[in-house]
Each structure stands twice: as C-alpha cells, then as structure tokens.
C-alpha cells in the first residue's frame, strides 16, 4: 500500500525508502567531522546532501549524545532558526525537519518553514510538544528513549527490549492519534538507552514494528552499536553504517537518517533491485 507524508500542501512518497541527512547546528555532537555549525558551512553541507539525494534535511541545535545536558530553549532557537531561514530561502521546495524536544522550538521552526518535527522524547520532555505538533498539522517523529541523554547509557535494562519498545511506541501512536496528530513516524531509538545487544535485537526485529502501520525511521549512522563491535571511532564507522543500513531496509525501514547521504542512497538503489521498489 502506498505511503506518503503530507505537510504544507506537499507530499513525500515513501513507497521507496528515502534518506534524511543530518545537519548539526551544534558544536558538540558525537560526530561533526567536516561539518561546522556556522550557517554558511551548514548551507554548503545541505547543498551537497540534497545533490547526493537526500529527501529530508534534519536540523538539530541540541546535542543528544550520551551524557549530554539539555540546553535552554533560547540557545537552541539561536542555533537553529537562522539555519532554517537560510535553507528555506535557498531550497524552498525541500523537506526540512527540526530535531528538538522543545515545543517552542518546534513551533518557531515550523513557522520558519520546517515540514516535520523529530522529537527524541516523544513528548516526555515538554508537555506541550504533542499538542503543538497537532496544532501545526505536520508529521511527527516519535522516538523511544530510556531515560534522558545524560542518563540513558548509564545502565539500560529491559526484560524484553523489542516488546517494551514496541509497546511504548504503540502507546505514543495512540496518544498522538487521540490528540489529532495525523501522521506519525516511529523510531526505535538506536543508541538511546540501549546496549549494543539491545540495539541489535531491535534491528533484527524491526519488521515487527510494521504492524503499527506507521513509517519507520532508522537512525544507525556511526553509532556505538557499530563502533564498539568493530573497535573503531565514529570517524571510521561508515562501512559498518552502510552494512546496517541495508539490514534496516531489509527489515522494512522507510527513512534512513544518516551523516553520509551518498552512501545511503547507494544502499537504497541496490536494495531496489532486490525488492522491486
């Protein structure tokens, strides 16, 4: 059955998987190689990502790496709004998403031209977030995370990680539907309050999440579930990322969120030969 996202009188076809390129408007993300947080550099990087085939650009102004403190709304706005305004000016027809857990940031970003809200907390950090997303009538990405960025990797525990993450996202989808968020994308939250083993259990069972009837986002790019088994740092985790992106596609992922768009697009093109997208 064809699936698509709708925002600002536009649609984005997800019948074939698409790539979301990561634009970090922050100086302290876990992987920022070759990417500065100043507006001009982010504009050049955005242009390259779009040229390489990205369908969505995800702008984030608050690092959520393990151990990270949450930043103020004011600081986040100062980082992301100028970037969004420049991107909208240069690429008015392109899909942008805002990676934020703050309702005020989401509201300002959508008013500035963003089409999707990407919330790692699924509304837990800001009680106004879900109502804001419903009012703005844009697609909403709901992610699972155990704890907060500061605490999530201290000692993550589950009795059954697949069952618990599935149940959590199922509950979030029901709440979103109840308050009027028409389109929800689900993200199991690889690396957010999970051990390497938890992450691979989720990846191997990602197809089960298709039962929720929502598009699935897989954010695996250069994360510790790749770095730890391979004994590499994020700078050298592209090959592992590419391998796991193919697994995610085989498991039914609709959106690959990545630092490296060209390589992710190559994975999608090859998968198309296998699955006749």
Image (spheres, rainbow, N blue to C red):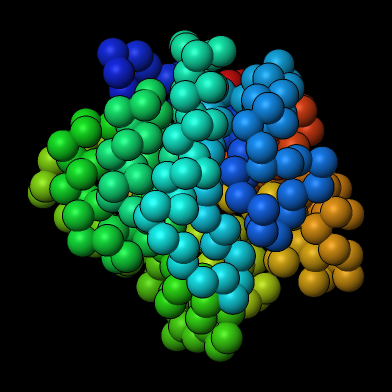
Q: Quadrant of the C terminus?
A: top right
Q: Quadrant of residue 67?
A: bottom right
Q: Residue at x 72, y 24 (%)?
A: 44
Can I make out residue 115 in this image? no
Q: Is residue 230 left or right of residue 247?
A: right
Q: Is residue 223 left or right of residue 20?
A: right
Q: Residue at x 29, y 65 (%)?
A: 124
Residue 155 x, y percent position in the rendering: 56, 88
Q: How many marks?
A: 0
Can I make out residue 153 in this image? yes
Residue 145 x, y percent position in the rendering: 44, 67
Residue in front for this viewpoint, 108 or 213: 108
Q: Quadrant of the N terminus?
A: top left
Q: Quadrant of residue 190?
A: bottom right
Residue in front for this viewpoint, 67 or 169: 67
Residue 68 x, y percent position in the rendering: 57, 71
Q: Is residue 265 left or right of residue 206?
A: right
Residue 149 x, y percent position in the rendering: 51, 71
Q: In this rendering, is residue 211 above or below 150?
A: above
Q: Residue at x 48, y 18 (%)?
A: 88
Q: Residue at x 21, y 33 (%)?
A: 136
Q: In this rendering, is residue 47 above or below 232?
A: above
Q: In this rendering, is residue 161 above or below 180?
A: below
């Amino acid at each position: 059955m064809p699936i698509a996202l709708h925002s600002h009188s536009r649609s984005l076809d997800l019948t074939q998987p698409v790539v979301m390129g990561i634009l970090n408007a922050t100086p302290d993300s876990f992987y920022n190689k070759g990417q500065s947080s100043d507006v001009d550099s982010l504009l050049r990087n955005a242009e390259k990502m779009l040229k390489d085939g990205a369908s969505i650009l995800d702008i984030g102004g608050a690092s959520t790496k393990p151990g990270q403190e949450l930043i103020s709304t004011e600081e986040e706005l100062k980082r992301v709004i100028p970037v969004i305004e420049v991107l909208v000016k240069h690429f008015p027809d392109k899909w942008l998403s805002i990676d934020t857990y703050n309702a005020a940031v989401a509201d300002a970003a959508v008013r500035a031209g963003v089409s999707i809200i990407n919330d790692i907390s699924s509304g837990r950090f800001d009680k106004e977030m879900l109502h804001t997303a419903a009012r703005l009538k844009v697609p909403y990405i709901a992610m699972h995370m155990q704890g907060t960025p500061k605490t999530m990797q201290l000692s993550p525990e589950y009795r059954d990680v697949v069952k618990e993450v599935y149940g959590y996202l199922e509950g979030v989808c029901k709440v979103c539907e109840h308050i009027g968020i028409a389109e929800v994308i689900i993200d199991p939250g690889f690396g957010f309050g999970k051990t390497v083993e938890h992450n691979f259990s989720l990846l191997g069972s990602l197809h089960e999440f298709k039962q929720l009837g929502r598009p699935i986002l897989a954010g695996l790019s250069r994360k510790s579930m790749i770095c730890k088994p391979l004994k590499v740092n994020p700078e050298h985790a592209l090959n592992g990322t590419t391998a796991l992106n193919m697994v995610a596609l085989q498991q039914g992922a609709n959106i690959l969120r990545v630092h490296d768009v060209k390589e992710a697009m190559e994975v999608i093109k090859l998968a198309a030969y296998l699955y006749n997208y």
